[in-house]
Image (cartoon, coloured by chain):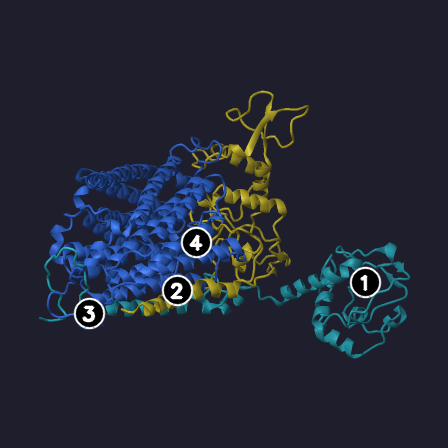
Chain colours: A yellow, B cyan, C blue
Amino acid sequence: MNSGPLLFLGLFATMACSWTGFVLAPQLQLGGLAQTNTVVVGDVLPQTYPLAQPGEAHAGSEVYRANGCAACHTEMVRPLDLGSDIQRSWGVRRSLAEDYLFANPVMLGSQRIGPDLANFGQRTDTNGVYLRLYDPGLITHGSVMPPYRFLFETRKIGFFPSPDALVLPDRDAPPAGFEIIPTEKARALAAYLLSLRQDGYLFEAPPPPLAKTNAIATNAVPAVKPAAK
Amino acid sequence: MNPGEPNKVVNQKDAEPVAGRSTVPIWLIIVFGLLFYWSQLFLAENAGGFNKEVYKPYPSFEEVAAANPQDPEAKQRAEGLRVYSSTCAACHQASGLGNPGNNVPPLAGSEWVQAEGGNRIAHIVLYGLTGPINVKGQDFNGGTMLPWRETYTDEQIAAVLTYIRSQWGNKGGPVDSQVVKAARAEARPTYETPDELLKIPVK
Amino acid sequence: MNVTVSPAPIISPASSQSQKVGSAASCPVGMLTLFAGAILWLLCASLLGLTTSLNFHAPTLLAGHGYLSYGRVHAAQNAALLYGFGVPSALGLGLWLLCRLGRTTLAGPAIVFIGAIFWNTAVTLGVGAILCGGGTGFEGFEMPAWCAPILFLSYLMIGLCALLTFHQREPGPLYPSQWFVVGSLFWFPWIFSTAALLLLCVPARGVLQATTAWWYARNFDTVFLGFAGLASAFYFIPKILGRPLHSHYQAALAFWTLALFGSWGGMPDGAPLPSWIISLGVVGTVLMAVPILTVATNFYQTVREDLNTLDADPTLRFTYVGLFFWVIAGAQQIVGALPPVSVVTDFTWFGPAQKELFRYGFFAFTVFGAIYYIVPRLLDLDQSAWHPKLFKWHFYLTFFGVLISYISLLVAGIGQGILLANTGNSFVDVMRRTVLPVRSIITGDLLVALGTILFLINFASVLATACRRCCAERKESA
């Protein structure tokens, strides 16, 4: 181990090993992922999945990125037996590589100071998103999420109140004659958050056996753990 | 002086450290070996055969495939829907009600569709139809249905026939692809009139 | 191996060349800039860390225009710590060790200086941009895309000087620190360029961005910073104790296994990836036990007879405490990778606890120890240039600060994990119940920040001493 060139060669070999295993091989396997069909479940018939992100949602993902939302929120659901994600109604099934096909940038996050957002679009609506951004403490008492009031503007009510004006309780209400409306960024962010859904079972994450009924598959979690192992 | 043993040396100012020649203790090698062995067992059980479609908790591709709905009926219905939506619904509509204004007969509630067997409708799909046809007491004149024998396989045609026979409240059993295969073997001319149709056995 | 080593005292005699290293003749400005910048950035990171901790006491306090909101400040803190403090101190350390062990002078000191200026400029602009909303959203790689080329070029400049310095070394056997330094210098451009290409230039498709980001973060911490810190430990502990390192072969085993296994991993257990990627990561992380055990036994055997004197020297104290933290952080990482544990601890404060201990407890401490030794020698002073009282306060404040932060994060993480595993507890409930340890992190951050300020003052006083002496010499010769 006294030769410089040998040292470099050895380092190159170990680096190549790691690079091949974690950069090249995943690229070869997952780089060619394309849209696929969801799995037939009872009466729910196959659909194309995933669908491309609408434009405003992409702009919203930029707002998400700029404000570092991934510092507190993850966007990945773990399988049924590995963690309590599905029991918490954070998703119907685990997240797969297919789910992020059209996401750019992909901000999976690594910490849950706040709940997981992979299926946030299924849990809320536009108004709920705006309220949570404007005053998180309103929805969740004692929340540590900072308010994002700079995404909204307070302006004088014109002839008629704006249809987008937030309906706020007294503690947050604007002064008389003023209304609070979301800015472009808030709208985009809301569009992005509402586009976050990972429904439809895929080949890699098939439905649990009990979901095979004639009813449309819902977010209901099977009472018994699937026997398939 | 045993070369394997490091000496206590005098602290000389500006002396640079050197490394002694002690060997790696055997217990460390054993630990390494054990951990390596464990890692191979772990990978055998948890790496899913390095298959890109195997995600936790499934240990292998076979288990993932087995966990997917195996019901051939469900698969056939899915294929039938796909064919219907992409080709038939353009004229017969997704609701199966057809388009009387354009001489497209309905499939929903149609006695032709709900016949005892699917042979007759298999012929219609394979070879096409011109000329008037009476469905549910209504006459449809002047419409043309294209032949689909070049476009779809026997299984696909059987799937779409099964689909229309069980959809929209229709009461009809599944159609086997053998029926379609036999109908295809007859190698009829391209178009048929309804008079000839009634001569075809239903089953 | 080198057979010229005789049974006689196995130390290498001093070479007159090595005395030139760090003297004014070899122009220390480059290395000093790297170290000074690093300390300033460490302080900056500590203050940003304080700001993030404040969020858990009063989330509405700094929410105003978004510049100081948690997400942005957290990203800025990471950038300041890793790129402002981590890389420059690793470079400065590496350059000095290559000079010393190669018994040569630094090649291209002016280029090192320019590179350091460029690097620090890029980091300053990058951190500012993150606070204004320009962050990339990738943990460990937060600075905007336009920073990457500047950083890469500056690194190449400094790295080239290091390569030349290594090349012009005196012939002889390589000491383990040299392997580690060359290893860390080699590793960074590879992982950085891969990440820059696949995340920023030609973004990879879908989830591959996440795999690249995780791979990069793991390699940066465990391999790049790990190599740099261990290089320092391998040099200073035997050097100051006046003993040889116990085993060359154990050091070699540790080196290659760290390079091989430390670079595998970083994917959380529930990530949306095929199971083989995650399992390979688990295997790599668990096999890290080999380098950790090897290094631990190697050093234990080296210092076994001098355990009482370990506290005597500032460098020694910081270095061996740092090494101790490295072992604990590594052990925690291994335990946290095992599937039964990671199911509970993933996505909780457990991960940040390990990172805090590794980056502050191990790497920062090792760098402190190195700076206490290197800087006086760069300025032709000796150890007495440091104020002993400031050093003592620096040590105890940072030691207890790191300990408090680490234990708070660990308790919060394990508590959060165990409570969340029970589906009867709502998420909000769990957050409320773990808020107390999370709030106590600020105490640790405060102590670390104070300790760093004292270190900065001490550092400045050493520089001032050198300046005064230089002025006095100039007056005499005039």
In 3D space, how far apart are the residues under numbered discs 4 and 1 (Cα atoms)? 78 Å
Q: Amino acid at mark 1?
A: Glu
Question: Residue under circle 2?
Answer: A15
Q: Which residue is mark 4?
A: C153
Q: Nearer the viewer, mark 3 or mark 2?
A: 2
Image quadrant in which you'd find residue C407: top left
Q: Residue furthest left?
A: B1
Work out how far the residue at label 3 is from the one at label 2, CA to CA, in angstroms.
27 Å
Residue type at mark 2 is Met
Q: Residues within 10 Å of mark 1 (few under 14, many from 20)?
A: some
> In the shown orientation, is residue B80 left or right of residue C116?
right
| Residue C204 vs residue C89, the one in the foreground | C89
Q: CA separation, marks 2 and 4? A: 21 Å
How far is the residue under mark 3 from the one under mark 1? 90 Å
Secondary structure under tag 3 reads loop
Query: In this rendering, which labeled residue sits more in front, label 3 or label 1?
Result: 3
Q: For the residues carrying marks 4 and 1, which lies nearer the camera in this image?
A: 4
The answer to whether marks 3 and 2 sit on the same chain is no
| Viewer-side residue, B198 vs B78 | B78
Residue B108, can we see it?
no
How far apart in space, not on screen, are marks 3 and 4 (Cα)?
A: 42 Å
Q: Is residue A197 left or right of residue C302?
A: right
Q: Which percent across, then down, holds residue B165?
A: 74, 63
The kind of residue on which mark 4 rests is Leu
Tag 1 subunit = B
Q: Is residue C261 above or below residue C425?
A: below
Label 1, on which residue?
B111
Q: CA distance from mark 2 to mark 1?
A: 71 Å
- Which residue is at a point 38% across and 68% down the rendered structure image? A13
